[in-house]
Amino acid sequence: MKLKSILLSTALAAAVMLPGTVWAKSLTVAIPNNLTGLDPTNINDTLSQTSIRLIYQGLFGFDKDMKLVPLLAESYEANDNATEFTIKLREGVKFHDGTDFNAAAVKTNIDRLANPDNKLSPDPQRAFRCDDPVSCPSGCDDDFACRSGKIRQRH
């Protein structure tokens, strides 16, 4: 009888430590203030930007030492003047609706941000100018590379 109790206790303890099946459920989060928006290109407060990073992922981010690290980008190369960048995108990534993440999606987002008619805040036209449009390189063997045109910081 004692052996049976020990075996049962051991089995129950082991079962508790096994990972269980987790089903998707809603997550409710409490924050001290209202977010100013959910569009990452149209917010400029720290609380909203921090919250948005839990929903959206960018091409690059920063590690704990504030060094640039790739997220949706795998790598990048700059020309000699650092005015053009070729970014290799991570393959196999999909948006929440199943649409592929690719160079065309990146181009659409950069074009949207650079368009002064969109009046996004903070105003990107004060921060940089696009001398050449963002493009998907001609002769590119796949859809996972994107080249930015001459995006320069305004002084």
Image: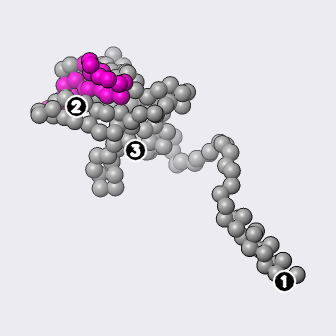
User: Could you tell me which secondary element the residue under label 1 belongs to?
Assistant: helix
Label 2 and label 1: CA atoms lie apart by 71 Å
User: Could you tell me which secondary element the residue under label 2 belongs to?
Assistant: strand
Furthest residue in direction right, as rendered: 1
Magenta region includes residue 149: yes
Is 35 positioned to the left or the right of 108 in the image?
A: right
For disc 2, the marked residue is: 85
State the residue at coordinates (29%, 22%): 140
For disc 1, the marked residue is: 2
Decide which of tag 2 and tag 1 comes sooner along the chain.
1
Q: Amino acid at mark 3?
A: Thr
- Image height check: is 107 above or below 16? above
Label 2 and label 3: CA atoms lie apart by 28 Å
State the residue at coordinates (29%, 39%): 75
Is 114 positioned to the left or the right of 15 in the image?
A: left
Decide which of tag 1 and tag 3 comes sooner along the chain.
1
Q: Does the image show residue 37?
A: no
Local packing at callout 2 (Cα closer than 10 Å; few below 14, some 14-19, many 20+) is: some
Label 1 and label 3: CA atoms lie apart by 60 Å
Furthest residue in direction left, as rendered: 81
- Percent across and percent down for residue 124 are 28, 28
Q: Does the image show residue 34?
A: yes
User: Could you tell me which secondary element the residue under label 3 belongs to?
Assistant: helix
> Which mark is in front, 2 or 3?
2
For disc 3, the marked residue is: 46
Q: Main secondary structure of the magenta part?
A: loop
**For the residues bearing labels 2 and 3, Cβ distance under 8 angstroms:** no
- Percent across and percent down for residue 99 are 50, 25
Q: Which mark is residue 71?
A: none
Where are the magenta residues, as a range? Answer: 133-155
State the residue at coordinates (26%, 37%): 76
